[in-house]
Image (cartoon, rainbow, N blue to C red):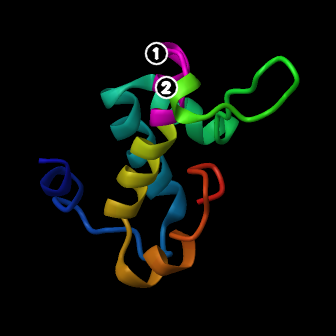
Amino acid sequence: MLRELLYKGHPFSGVNYQFWKVRINFFMKSIDRGIWNAIMNGLYIPMTVVHVEKSYDELTDAENKKVQYNCVAKNIITFALNLDVFFKVSQYNSAKEM
């Protein structure tokens, strides 16, 4: 379903970025505002008290949800890109970098 929604228009090709950004912003916020926050704030990395990155098994439900927002945002962005742009941004770890 997500793919069909994104491909009703044309995928981003590097032209009219401001138009695409507003549309993708609305789309992500309609799913969950936390997805757009993952883009604006960058990748959420849960840390222990001594600032060591937590393993997946140590995450609380709230932390796992915040980490998941970045994954969802990256998925939405890559579905909304044409092939040339996709390969330029697919190697980044965070949706914000994309």
Residue that numbered label 2 is attached to: 64
Left/right of residue 18 with respect to residue 23 in the rendered view: right
- Which stretch is magenta? 59-68
Instruction: Indicate the amino acid at tag 2.
Output: Asn
Q: Which image quadrant is residue 26 in?
A: top left
Q: Residue at x 60, y 34 (%)?
A: 55
Q: Which type of secondary structure does the marked residue at label 1 adopt? A: helix
Answer above or below: position of 23 versus 78: above
Please, what is the dominant secondary structure of the magenta stretch?
helix
Marker disc for residue 61: 1
Residue in the image at 83% along x and 17% along y: 49
Q: Label 1 neighbourhood size at 10 Å, few (<14), some (14-19), many (20+)? A: few
Q: What residue occupies the far right of the structure in this picture?
A: 50
Res 38 → quadrant: top right
Query: Which residue is the extreme one toward the bottom?
Result: 84
Residue 46 on image: x %, y %? 67, 27
Tell me what residue is drawn at x 56 percent, y 50 percent.
Answer: 95
- Residue at 42 percent of width and 76 percent of height: 13
Task: Measuring from the top left, give residue 48's x and y in whole percent.
Answer: 76, 22
Q: Is 87 within the magenta?
A: no
Q: Secondary structure at mark 2?
A: helix
Q: Nearer the viewer, residue 93 or 58?
A: 58
Give the label on residue 28, or none: none
Is 64 part of what is drawn in magenta?
yes
At which x and y percent is residue 96? 63, 49
Residue 54 lies, with reference to residue 11, above or below; the image says: above
**Mark 1 and 2 residues: CB-CB less than 8 Å, in contact?**
yes
- Say which amino acid is labelled 1: Asp
* Image quadrant in which the C terminus is located: bottom right
Q: How many marks?
A: 2
